[in-house]
């Protein structure tokens, strides 16, 4: 059932009805939207639900599907808008860091290099319920960019969306040896506080009776065996710190990522999704917790969100 939504910019959609859990719903199967080169960061309204999650003819909607975000079919950075017809459940890794994000960057780069009017076109293929899939969640997207004469400027590409899975990494033996030797120093009683200059502001760290699983990285940092990091209270961990912490975590678990919280460390973590590995401040950042490695632990995204700003 084609229809046009007159927003800014204009979006045209084709939609179809389907049934899930005895409730009739509507989902977008094709979208064409006028691309806009955005020079400012656009904030999304997280209260807008995914279209497929809404119950047709009712005010109610489903709860969030585990491991998914409300992903925009046409990104806000490309001129998309916060309307439910433009939002579908997307697996977190695919939406934020994977093939979908890469395609958005490709389109943004094209817009920055070319003048004229263009449309983003997306055909949405949903999971097959008869095969055990969830018909509310897309399985693949066919994406291209065309001019207003219908000529393709970025050729059609099918992007298959897969759920985030735990992956085992093959480790570098030299890195493992370096961390193993440094850990012996930590086990001998070394602490970050011993390295601080007298008069330097004290970092907010967990007490010495609390586990500091990545203190070994502070030792390597202060002895310039890895890229050094400026640390301070109330700061976030840098992307390089995150990479180092996850690598040390994998070294301790035969290449797998495993939560440092005993309530959930029975199975490996993925990189993204509810079971995705996140770096948690043991003393919360909101309570001026330091971004030193000694204040870090790996937990799942779900546990990190549940913890909030509570001090362990």
Image (cartoon, rainbow, N blue to C red):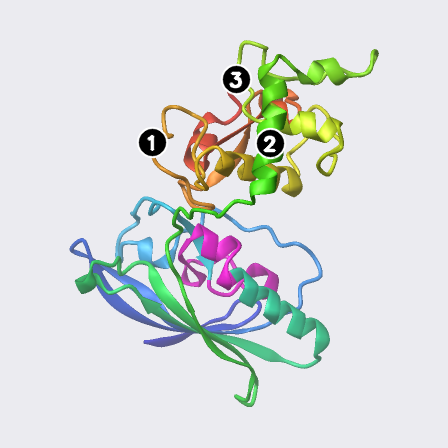
Magenta stretch: give its range.
Answer: 73-100
> Label 1 neighbourhood size at 10 Å, few (<14), some (14-19), many (20+)?
few
Q: Is residue 177 left or right of residue 221?
A: left
Marks 3/2: CA–CA distance: 17 Å
Please give the residue where the numbered disc 3 appears in the rendered image: 211
Q: Earlier in the sequence, mark 3 or mark 2?
A: 2
Q: Which residue is mark 1?
A: 266
Q: Earlier in the sequence, mark 2 or mark 1?
A: 2
Which of the marked residues, 1 or 3, is nearer the chain's N terminus?
A: 3
Mark 3 packing: few (<14 Cα in 10 Å), some, or many (20+)?
some
| Near-viewer residue (257 or 158) | 257
Task: Residue at 56% x, 42% y: name it.
Answer: 173
CA gap between label 1 and label 3 equals 19 Å
> For residue 291, which numbered disc appears in the image?
none
The residue drawn where x is 51% and y is 36% is: 251
Tell me, yes or no, whether the highlighted magenta stretch contains residue 124. Answer: no
Q: Position of residue 79 (x, y in %)?
A: 59, 65
**In the picture, residue 124 is in which quadrant?**
bottom left
The residue at 46%/64% (across/down) is 73
Left or right: 312 as drawn, with respect to 292: left
Residue 190 in percent (x, y) is at: 65, 15
- Tell which of 249 and 99 is nearer to you: 249
Q: Crowdedness of circle 2 by 10 Å Cα count: few (<14), some, many (20+)?
A: some
Judging by the rendered image, the residue that carries numbered circle 2 is 179
Report the residue at 58% width, 27% height from top: 214
- Residue 116, relative to residue 273: is it above or below? below
Q: Are the residues flagged by discs 2 and 1 in contact, CB closer than 8 Å?
A: no
């Amino acid at each position: 059932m084609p229809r046009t939504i007159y927003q800014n910019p204009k979006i045209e959609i084709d939609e179809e009805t389907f049934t899930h859990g005895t409730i009739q719903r509507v989902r977008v199967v094709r979208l064409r939207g006028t691309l806009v080169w955005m020079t400012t960061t656009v904030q999304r309204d997280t209260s807008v639900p995914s279209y497929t999650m809404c119950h047709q003819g009712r005010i109610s909607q489903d709860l969030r599907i585990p491991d998914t975000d409300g992903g925009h079919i046409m990104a806000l950075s490309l001129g998309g808008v916060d309307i439910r017809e433009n939002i579908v459940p997307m697996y977190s890794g695919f939406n934020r860091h994977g093939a979908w994000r890469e395609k958005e960057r490709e389109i943004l780069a094209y817009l920055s290099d070319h003048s004229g009017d263009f449309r983003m076109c997306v055909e949405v293929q949903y999971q097959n319920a008869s095969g055990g899939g969830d018909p509310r969640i897309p399985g693949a997207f066919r994406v291209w960019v065309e001019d207003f004469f219908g000529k393709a400027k970025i050729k059609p590409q099918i992007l298959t969306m897969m759920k985030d899975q735990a992956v085992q990494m093959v480790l570098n033996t030299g890195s493992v040896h370096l961390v193993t030797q440094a850990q012996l120093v930590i086990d001998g009683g070394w602490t970050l506080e011993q390295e601080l200059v007298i008069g330097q502001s004290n970092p907010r760290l967990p007490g010495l009776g609390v586990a500091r699983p990545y203190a070994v990285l502070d030792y390597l940092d202060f002895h310039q065996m890895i890229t050094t990091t400026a640390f301070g209270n109330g700061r976030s961990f840098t992307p390089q710190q995150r990479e180092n912490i996850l690598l040390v975590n994998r070294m301790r678990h035969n290449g797998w990522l495993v939560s440092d919280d005993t309530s959930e460390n029975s199975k490996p973590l993925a990189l993204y999704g509810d079971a995705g590995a996140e770096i948690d401040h043991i003393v919360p950042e909101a309570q001026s917790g330091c971004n030193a490695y000694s204040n870090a632990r790996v937990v799942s995204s779900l546990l990190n969100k549940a913890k909030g700003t509570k001090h362990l």
